Amino acid sequence: MAMGPTLTSSTTTTANPPSQPRKLTTQSGGAQPAPNRGVQRMWNSSIGIKVIVAITGGLLLLFVIGHLIGNLQVFLGPDALNEYGEKLRAIPALLWAVRIGLLAVFLVHVVFTIRLALLNRQARPVAYAKKTPIKATLSSRTMVVTGLMTLAFVLYHLMHFTFRVTNPQYQNLVDAHGRFDVYSMVIMGFQNVFISIAYIIAMLLLGYHLSHGIASLFQTIGWNNPRTQSFFERLAFVVAAFIVIGNISIPISILLGWVGLPGGGM
Ligand code: HEM
């Protein structure tokens, strides 16, 4: 049976009880040096974690939008896409710096999101559990699941198109100008119906994750209030839908034969 107001314990464990005087610590006698305490406080605070998740999520969103705009050049033909790929690889040191930065942002986002889900679960006293709105629990759980599935997709995607481990035959694709033939790689990749379906499913999961993630981002930065909430939820949905439809249009157009190999090869 659900009990009365039992929401007291978990959030107050680190604070000094109001009736006791604050303990003075010497400079070296504290349990931990100050910077460590700051990091630890952040690690244990839902608000701090939400801010980190929002910042890293925003950066990943910018990457996904930029990547989509780059990918849509497949509709402009081999020259445009291959030239774009060539430009991205023009300065290897810069490319690797961006890759390592992106990886770090991705890892921080994943680790802190899982930490937030665990903190939320710990902070909920047992008697309160039954009163938790089912919608909120389902949504945060689905965020972790769709996030981990996106992680699995990105790992596969890197092995597929970036390192070409799953399909080493792409490795030697070169266009008429001697550039790596990204265009033919994408067409050959999505002419495989199973790969296309896997990408489409991954994009739908990503879309769900993004529409909820973007809405939470607006909440974290404090733009959300009862008047603006429905506007920001709709905006989040529209941005996510743009990303999903844009990305899915590529495998679908290739499967339907609207976009094909240079010279019409299959
Ligand atoms: C249909 C959709 C997509 C297509 C056609 C596509 C295409 C590509 C291609 C061709 C590359 C390799 C570029 C090169 O080495 O020249 C690539 C790399 C990459 N893609 Fe995608 N992509 C898609 C969706 C996504 C999504 C949704 C994400 C993230 C959630 C993503 C994340 C990445 C990452 C992280 C890389 C590695 C970038 C690097 O080289 O450092 N892609 N993608």
Image (tube, grey):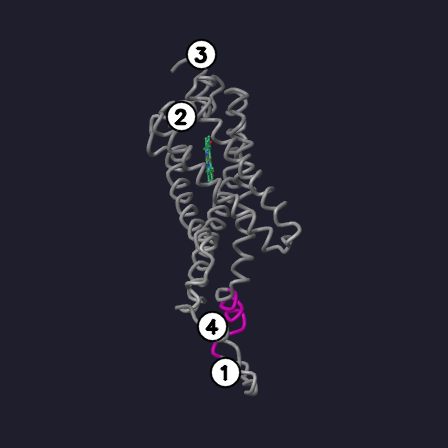
Q: What amino acid type should be assigned to the residue bearing mark 2?
A: Phe
Separation of marks 4 and 2 at Cα, in angstroms: 57 Å
Q: Which residue position holds label 2?
A: 190
Q: Nearer the viewer, mark 1 or mark 3?
A: 3
Q: Tell me the residue at 53%/51% (across/down).
A: 56
Q: Quadrant of the N terminus?
A: bottom left
- The answer to whether the beta carbon of the residue marked 3 is less than 8 Å from any atom of ligand 1 is no
Q: Which residue position holds label 1?
A: 29
Q: Tell me the residue at 40%/48% (across/down).
A: 145
Residue 4: assigned label: 4
Q: Kindly state the secondary structure of the residue where label 1 is placed.
A: loop
Q: Which badge, 1 or 2, is on the more N-terminal residue?
A: 1
Q: Quadrant of residue 265?
A: top left
Q: Which residue position holds label 3?
A: 263
Q: Is residue 215 above or below residue 166?
A: below
Q: What amino acid type should be assigned to the residue bearing mark 3?
A: Gly
